[in-house]
Image (tube, rainbow, N blue to C red):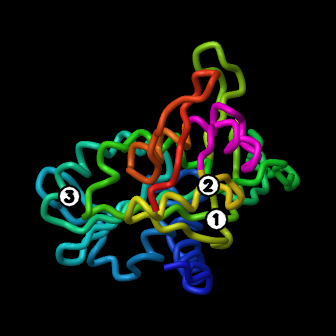
Amino acid sequence: MNDPDRFSRACSAVLSVSHEKEGIGTQGEKTLHAVFKNYYEPDKTFHEVKTGSFIADIRRGGAIVEIQTHGLYRMKKKLAAFLPENEVTVVHPIPHARTVRWIEKDGTLSPKRRSPKTGKFTDAVSELLGIRDLLRDPHLTVILSLVDCNDYKVRSGKVGRKRGAMRFERIPTALVSEMKLSTPSDYLAFLPADLPDVFTSLDVSRAGRLHRDDAAYLLLLLFSVGAVDRIGKNERGGYLYRRLF
């Protein structure tokens, strides 16, 4: 969809009603999830629709939209149940530019701090690998959404050995860009543009400024969906790849 103005209206609609009144981090449904539901379907009649043994985030006829902020692997059973009879879109938001604020014990907020990390589409590779067996289904579309947001962190005591554990509330502020993945060729958008015809994970790492492991995971994803082929190995035993489109 990639409509920043519509996304801004969805943010305003969600934040002006119950989420804002109930307070940060207290509602059952997280704000980021609620905003994306409103963005893709403003009519709540089509929200939370029972479909078989599961509840679809959004359903209009045979079209289903699922918003999943993390843990795509947890959706495997749900997607497997939906896909045979429905067109399914999985929307995965990725934090882009973030400001961070702490909620102190007395309820006051710390000053805003800009996070040094900027999110990118390749951050979703490990998530996509969790459902790679389903990605070639012709009824499935994945939309990766880069979104600017404000993060609120709460010091919540001790969990296991970790002190000062944090729970998040993420308030989206702007839609930056979206990537739509419907066919194997769509996944080639992850690759740097200046690769040779035959390339290795090291080539992808250098051209895309990725850690070597991240480049290897990316190529595993592209191989799994049929976007690239392995055509042999180099003298070091590393796979040689080429695009299939």
First in sequence: mark 1 or mark 2? 1
- Say few, some or many: other residues with alpha carbon within 10 Å of mark 2 (under 14 / 14 to 19 / 20 or more): some
Q: Is residue 109 visible?
A: yes
Q: Which residue is mark 3?
A: 83
Would you say 208 lies left or right of 24 here?
right
Q: Is residue 10 magenta?
A: no
Range of magenta residues:
198-216
**Front position in the image: 105 or 228:** 228
Q: Looking at the image, which residue sits at the far bottom?
A: 5
Q: Residue at x 52, y 73 (%)?
A: 14
**Front position in the image: 36 or 109:** 36
Q: Is residue 199 above or below residue 216?
A: below
Q: Which residue is mark 2?
A: 191
- In the rendering, which numbered label is found on residue 147? 1
Looking at the rendered image, the disc whose residue lies closer to the viewer, 1 or 2, is: 2
Q: Is residue 8 above or below residue 114?
A: below
SS class, disc 1? strand
Q: Is residue 201 above or below residue 100?
A: above
SS class, disc 2? loop
- Residue 81: image location, x then y, percent: 17, 51
